[in-house]
Amino acid sequence: MLLLASFSVSAETINTSSTADASSSIVTQTSPAISLLQDYQHAFRQRQYEISYIVVRQGHIEPVRLIHGVVNDVEVAHRVYLNGPANEAVYRDGTVAFFEPGQTPYSLSTTRLPGMFGNLAAVDLAHLQANYDLVIAGKSRVAGRPAQVMRIVPKSSDLYGLYFWIDYGSQLPLRLDIVDQNGELVEQQMAVTLSEFEQPSEWMVELSNLDLPSTVVGKEAVNNEKHKINWRLGWQPKGMNIAQKEQHSLAVLSESVDYIKLSDGLFDISVYANAIGQTNPLREQLVRQGATSLHTVVRKGIEITVVGEIPPETASKIADSVVIGPYLEKANEPAQ
C-alpha cells in the first residue's frame, strides 16, 4: 500500500493575502494563467527532454524517469519507476502501453500520457477554466531552476486542487502538489533533474518502432438487455462527465465487470459494478493511498467499487449514490 505524503506546501508559494485580494487575483490573472498553461502544453508535447522526479505519498518516495521525444512527427514517451519491480508505460501517437508486474502487457487508446503531468498537458483549457480557478501564485526554484507557480483551485469542494511549478526557460513541469480543501498536501511529484535535447534520443527512436501490445477494447454494452446488473449513478461531482460506459476486464477478476468512467479532463474516477458470486468479492472497504481513494460497498448482491484521485468522502458519496434496479425508459441525469 502506498503511504501518504507528510510534507506541507512550501510557504513561499502560497498567497497569504486576504480573501478579497485572492478573488481579485483570480479575475485579473486568468488570462496569464491560461497563456502559461498553453505554453506548457505545447512544450510538454513537442520538446525532447528527460525528467527524473520523485513521487511522494505519505512519506514514501518513488523515483520515476520520464523521457519524451518527437520522432518523424510522432510523439513518443517512456515512463518507468526506478525502484522495485519494473513498472513501465510507453506512449506513442495516441496509444499508451502498460508493462506492470504480474500482468500481461496491454495498450489503451488515449490522447494523454500517463500521470498528472500528462493530464495537464492534454486537458481542454476552456473546460478546466469552467471548473477550476486558475491563479498565478508567484515564483520559486525547483531542481535549481527558476519556476512560475500556479494554483488550480476546484470550484467544487468534492475535488482536489493543485499547485503547479513550470520551468521558466523550457515551460516544462518541475513540481506538482495535489492538495485537499484545507491546503494539506496529499501527494507530490517533484523533479530532481531536467535535461533537454536537440534531437530525440536513440531510445525514443527505438520505441517509435516497437511493436506495442494489443489494445484493450471494452464492450459498449451498459444498456444491453443481456446485462444482469441494472444500475446507474445517482450523484457525481460537479464538472465531472461520463466519459466511458462499457464492460471492462480487470486483472484481479476472472470476468468482465460493468464500468463507468467519470472525468473532468484533469481527474478521472472509475466506478465498477459486479455481481457477487461471479467472482471472489472484495470486503467493504475505504482506502486512501496518497491522492487515490478506493471505496467498495456491497448492496443488493452487487459489489460497487469507486477508485480515483479524489477525496475519500467523494468516493463514498459516489458509491452510496448508486441506484440498483430496472432501467428507466428515460435516462435519469445524476443529481448535482
Image (spheres, rainbow, N blue to C red):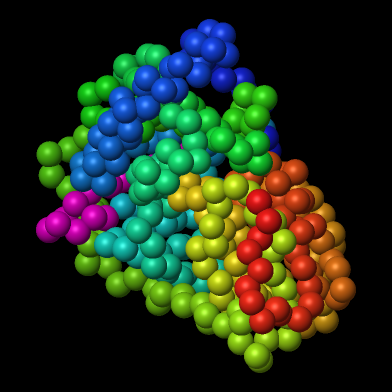
Q: Position of residue 138 (x, y in %)?
A: 40, 14
- Asked if residue 224 lies in the magenta stretch, the reply is no
Tally the marks. Answer: 0
**Residue most toward the front?**
330
In the image, residue 229 sits, relative to residue 241, either above or below, namely: below
Is 241 displayed left or right of 49 in the figure?
A: right
Residue name at image x 46 percent, y 70 percent: 106
| Residue 49 visible in the displayed image | no
The image quarter in which residue 245 lies: bottom right
| Residue 310 visible in the displayed image | yes
The image quarter in which residue 234 lies: bottom right
Residue name at image x 38 percent, y 54 percent: 112
Q: Which region of the structure is painted magenta? A: 63-76
**Residue most toward the top?**
17
Q: Position of residue 256 (x, y in %)?
A: 63, 80
In the image, residue 238 sits, relative to residue 26, either above or below, namely: below
Q: Position of residue 49 (x, y in %)?
A: 25, 39
> Is 9 or 64 nearer to us in this picture?
9
Magenta segment main secondary structure: strand
Q: Position of residue 152 (x, y in %)?
A: 48, 31
**Residue most toward the bottom?**
226
Residue name at image x 70 percent, y 46 percent: 314
Residue name at image x 50 percent, y 63 percent: 243
